[in-house]
Amino acid sequence: MVEPTRSAPAALRGPRVTLAPLVEADLDAVRRWRSDPTVTAYWITQAVPTPAELREWLARNRREGNLLWLIRDERGRRIGFVTLFGIDPEHRKAELALMIGERDAWGQGYARETLRTLLRHAFRPVAEHGLGLHKVWLTVVVENEAARRAYAACGFRQDGVLRDDLYRDGRWHDQILMSVLAAEFHQFDQGEN
Ligand SMILES: CC(C)(COP(=O)(O)OP(=O)(O)OC[C@H]1O[C@@H](n2cnc3c(N)ncnc32)[C@H](O)[C@@H]1OP(=O)(O)O)[C@@H](O)C(=O)NCCC(=O)NCCS
């Protein structure tokens, strides 16, 4: 069974992206992305965090055993971050959140590649230095077409609809609950290669 981790996440490598533990030096970039209303249009909050709030965000995530990775592209540029949080060791599941914050990196497959790299690690057995999870789940605003496509392209399926789950721009938006199971991902991942 996966144990709650208090240690830094493992460094991961995809064909183009590298995922490294997110550290204090990355927070300026996170703040810039979180300040862009186009990037946060479907994010859980559009409030722009102060530097102090972001330091507390990082510290809280570490305390809670959440895993945060900074995403760099093939040139080493910071392009976004991805997290696994609410890691549940009993039921071997975790929630995922992903932000490709550099808008000029959108539409080039970085989200898909990040997700596949991360899910391989998440579903790898603990004995093989993975997280040994059974399920990764998330919620996505129904209008966030790009995110829904990226998740579907990595094996996520729709579990249901959370009605009026997010209030933005003066109206309620539904969110889709999506998840991918280890066996589904392996089948899907093998089929892709
Ligand atoms: C959503 C997001 C992760 C997508 O990242 P990305 O690197 O541009 O995605 P990819 O290039 O891997 O593309 C994924 C899919 O979305 C499609 N896509 C990309 N931009 C799109 C757009 N503006 N509208 C519709 N589809 C789009 C791609 O064609 C691809 O679909 P396909 O596999 O069917 O070809 C990124 O835009 C982002 O981080 N946005 C801000 C934060 C956010 O919304 N995060 C998700 C919260 S749930």
Image: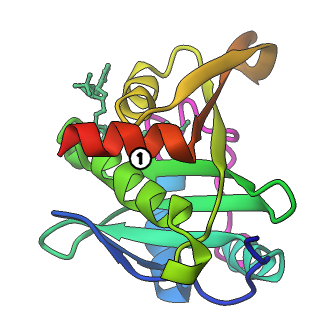
How is the structure coloured here?
rainbow
Q: Is residue 36 left or right of residue 65?
A: left
Query: Which range is magenta?
Result: 36-53
Q: Quadrant of the N terminus?
A: bottom right
Query: Is residue 178 covered in magenta?
Result: no
Q: Amino acid at mark 1?
A: His
Q: Look at the picture and state if 152 lies above or below 17.
A: above
Residue 13 x/y as whole percent: 28, 73
Residue 68 x/y as whole percent: 58, 70
Mark 1: C-beta under 8 Å from nearest atom of ligand 1:
no
Extreme residue toward the left, this view: 75
Residue 51 x/y as whole percent: 64, 75
Magenta stretch secondary structure, dominant: loop
Residue 167: name its quadrant: top right
Which residue appears at 54% of the width and 62% of the height? 122
Which residue appears at 45% of the width and 42% of the height? 185
Which residue appears at 49% of the width and 80% of the height? 128
Pick the residue in front: 165 or 154. Answer: 154
State the count of labels: 1
Which residue appears at 79% of the width and 76% of the height? 4
Can residue 89 be seen at all in this image of the molecule?
yes
Q: Could you tell me which secondary element the residue under label 1 belongs to?
A: helix
Badge 1, how many Cα within 10 Å: few under 14, some, many 20+?
Answer: some
Q: Look at the picture and state if 109 lies above or below 151.
A: below
Pick the residue in front: 22 or 181. Answer: 181
Q: Is residue 106 left or right of residue 117?
A: left
Residue at image mark 1: 186
Q: Is residue 187 left or right of residue 77?
A: right
Pick the residue in front: 39 or 6. Answer: 6
